[in-house]
Image (tube, rainbow, N blue to C red):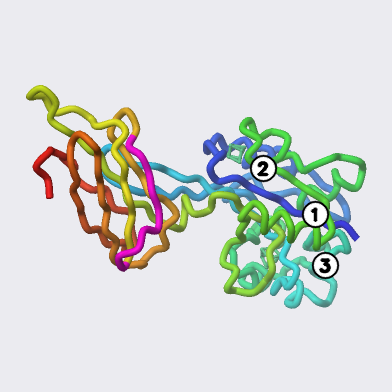
Amino acid sequence: MNKWNLIIDVAGCENCNNCVLAAKDELVGNDFPGYSAPHATQGRGVIHIERTVRGAAHMVDAAYVPKMCNHCDDAPCVKAGADGAVKKRDDGIVIIDPIKAQGRRDLVDACPYGAIVWNEPLQLPQSWFFDAHLLDTGAAAPRCVGVCPTQAMEAVKLSDDAMAQRVKAEGLRTLAPEIGTKPRVYYKNLHRSDHCFIAGSVTATVDGRVECLDGAEVALLRAGAKVAGAVTDAFGDFKFDALPRHSGSYLVRISHPDHGVTTRSASIEASSVVLDDLPLSATSA
Ligand code: SF4
Ligand code: SF4
């Protein structure tokens, strides 16, 4: 049977919050019997955006990661609500029953992702239920997908085998897979949030003037072996991305046929590294 999955491209998210507002617009104050009681007007919604800033000086980037219920296949909330308070549908969607879950604050703590919010006025745990009430009446996708101006979100209903092929082909990842809950929300380019980069700017002296050096070859080496290569752009900039946190020592080797060679060491611990200006000259070692 085909099941729902959500794919989010972190590189495409511009933090416009349309998806956050669409979920609020759909759910706050609206009753969908069997799916959801009206969500609260106050407090965090069931979709929220988390920001990560990397780098320093002129080489800074920000990544925005929309987060919501992951519709896990091995969900702790489903186990905690096995009396019918939480159910996993055949199409993969996890729904907190708006009547049977009444008063079940323990369900908020059961989710290791913090994806369940507590509706204080109704004394009810609530989550993003994939807009199942809309899908069940013919909608092609949840509202967050339709309102995203960059098409950073995609909802797909596929067999688990077909989804596994997309995961492999597109390098999709889930949040905290080590927890073992088997989420159905996948991310592209998640490295922009949880990995580091080494970047720098290369200059050269031309006719007595210091200029950004376009077209220098940059190699990233680890234990003497090249692991990545780049060419500086018109600003002399290069960037090696998706390096694991705490991956340790690297060597950056920069070369240009007219301006020689230089090297610089860098160490990746908890954060990205921006190398200071990297001047090349014909006499560099
Ligand atoms: S609507 Fe799209 S671009 Fe806007 S915050 Fe959500 S995922 Fe990001
Ligand atoms: S993300 Fe949390 S609330 Fe959603 S299915 Fe997984 S454990 Fe349950």
Q: Is 102 rendered above or below residue 156?
A: below
Extreme-top residue of the structure: 207
Residue 104 lies, with reference to residue 6, above or below; the image says below
Marks 1/3: CA–CA distance:
15 Å
Q: Amino acid at mark 3?
A: Lys
Q: Give above or below for 41 relative to 70.
A: above
Residue 67 x %, y %: 60, 53
* Upstream in sequence: badge 2 or badge 3: 3
Q: Main secondary structure of the magenta part?
A: strand
Q: Can residue 123 be seen by looking at this rendering?
A: no
Q: Residue furthest front?
A: 257
Residue at left offset 13%, top offset 38%: 281
Residue beneath label 2, please?
153
Residue annotated with mark 1: 4
Asked whether residue 227 is drawn in magenta, I would say yes
**Is disc 1 surrounded by few (<14), some (14 to 19) or many (20+) residues within 10 Å?**
many
Q: Nearer the viewer, mark 2 or mark 3?
A: 2
Of the numbered discs 1 and 3, the one sitting upstream in the chain is 1
Which sits earlier in the primary sequence, circle 2 or circle 1? 1
Magenta residues, as a range? 223-232
Q: Amino acid at mark 2?
A: Met
Count of all numbered marks drawn on residues in the image: 3
Q: Secondary structure at mark 1?
A: strand
In the picture of the structure, the residue carrying the numbered disc 3 is 87
Does the closest atom of ligand 1 sit within 8 Å of the Cβ of label 2? yes
Nearer to us of marks 1 and 3 is 1
